C-alpha cells in the first residue's frame, strides 16, 4: 500500500475559501477541471472530466472548514476504491492543506505521474484562493504526454 | 515505510541534458539551489544549501543517461539515511524522469511538504532543460511558511 501525500499553505485568513473550493461544483471547476458536475453533499457523487478521461468521487465526509473525504467510485482502474482526504487547519496567515490519496495497490508509473499532477493542482487551488485565478484542466500545466 | 514518487516528461531528444542537470554542480545549481557545491562522482558528496538549511547527498550510483542514486548523509533528521533515485528513459519526444525518495520512517507532515516541493523542483528541472531557465532556490516557488 502506497500513498500520495502533499502539503500546501494557502495565504488566507480562514479555511473557509479553501473549504468552498473543495466542496462546491463552482469552486472545484476553478482549480481542478472546468468540466465538473454532480452533487457535493455527503453521499453525493462529483464527476470530474478531463480531455483524457475522468473520475467519479463519492463524498464520504464533510466537516466545514476542517475536512473533506472522497472515495473514487469510477475512473482509471488503479484509482477505483482509493480515497482522497483533505484536512484543513488555520496556522497564522495560512490555511494548511494536508492532502492524502491513499489505497493505491502498487507504486505503478501512473501513480508517480498522479503524484506530480496532484502537486501541480494543489498549486492551482492555492493560486485560486490567493489570486482568484486557478489553472484547471484544460488550462493545467502539462507535465508529459500523459498530461 | 512511505515513499515520495514523481514522474515528469522533459521535452528533449535524448536524456543527456537531464542527466547532466542531475550530475554536475553547475546543472544542479540551475534547478534545485544556487548554493550547490561538492563532488558529483560516485562516492562523492554533493552539498545543497537553502535559506532554511540543507542536505548532503552521497552519490551512490551513476549510469550515464539512465540512473542517478543518492543517499542523504546529512540534513534534517527525517531525511538522514533516506535515498533518492532518478531513473531516466527516452520515450519519443520526452525524457521520462521517474523520481523516488524512499526510506521515510513515518508519513510526517514535513514529508507531505517535501513531496509537494519535490514536484515543484521537478518542474524547475523540466523548465531548465526545455527553456534554459529553472527556478532554483532562492527563486523557487514558495508553497507555505516552510518554503
Image: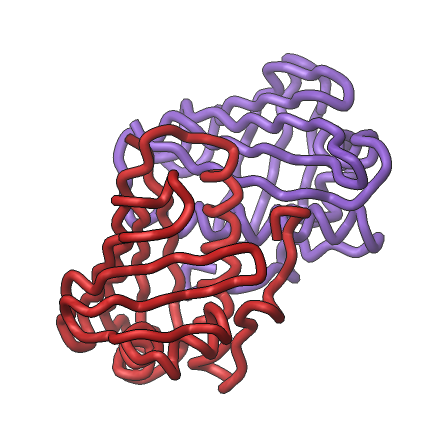
Chain colours: A red, B purple
Tell me the quadrant of the picture where the N terminus of chain A can be found: top left
Would residue A82 be found to the left or right of residue B4 on screen?
A: left
Residue at the spot x=24%, y=59% of the render? Answer: A70
Picture quadrant where residue B103 is located: top left
User: Camera-side residue: B106 or A32?
Assistant: A32
Would residue B59 be found to the left or right of residue A88 on screen?
A: right
Regarding residue B2, the answer to whether it shows in the image is yes
Q: How many marks?
A: 0
User: Camera-side residue: B33 or A24?
Assistant: A24
Residue at the spot x=59%, y=33% of the render? Answer: B98
Q: In this picture, is B126 found above or below B78?
A: below
Regarding residue B143, the answer to whether it shows in the image is no
- Where residue A22 sits in the image (x, y, percent)? 32, 72
Picture quadrant where residue B81 is located: top left
Would residue B43 be found to the left or right of residue A35 on screen?
A: right
- Where residue A142 sits in the image (x, y, percent)? 65, 57
- Where residue B104 sits in the image (x, y, percent)? 34, 31
Q: In this picture, is A118 found above or below B74?
A: below
Residue at the spot x=25%, y=50% of the render? Answer: A83
Residue at the spot x=52%, y=59% of the render? Answer: A120
Would residue B31 be found to the left or right of residue B133 on screen?
A: left
- Where residue B139 sits in the image (x, y, percent)? 65, 62
Amino acid at each position: 500500500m502506497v500513498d500520495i501525500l502533499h502539503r500546501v499553505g494557502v495565504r488566507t485568513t480562514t479555511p473557509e475559501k479553501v473549504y468552498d473550493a473543495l466542496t462546491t461544483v463552482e469552486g472545484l471547476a476553478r482549480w481542478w477541471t472546468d468540466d465538473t458536475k454532480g452533487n457535493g453533499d455527503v453521499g453525493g457523487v462529483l464527476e470530474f472530466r478531463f480531455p483524457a478521461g475522468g473520475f467519479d468521487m463519492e463524498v464520504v465526509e464533510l466537516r466545514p472548514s476542517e475536512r473533506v473525504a472522497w472515495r473514487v467510485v469510477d475512473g482509471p482502474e488503479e484509482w477505483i476504491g482509493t480515497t482522497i482526504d483533505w484536512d484543513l487547519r488555520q496556522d497564522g496567515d495560512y490555511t494548511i492543506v494536508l492532502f492524502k490519496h491513499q489505497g493505491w495497490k502498487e507504486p505503478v508509473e501512473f501513480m508517480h505521474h498522479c503524484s506530480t499532477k496532484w502537486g501541480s493542482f494543489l498549486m492551482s487551488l492555492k493560486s485560486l484562493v490567493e489570486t482568484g485565478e486557478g489553472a484547471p484542466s484544460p488550462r493545467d500545466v502539462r507535465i508529459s504526454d500523459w498530461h
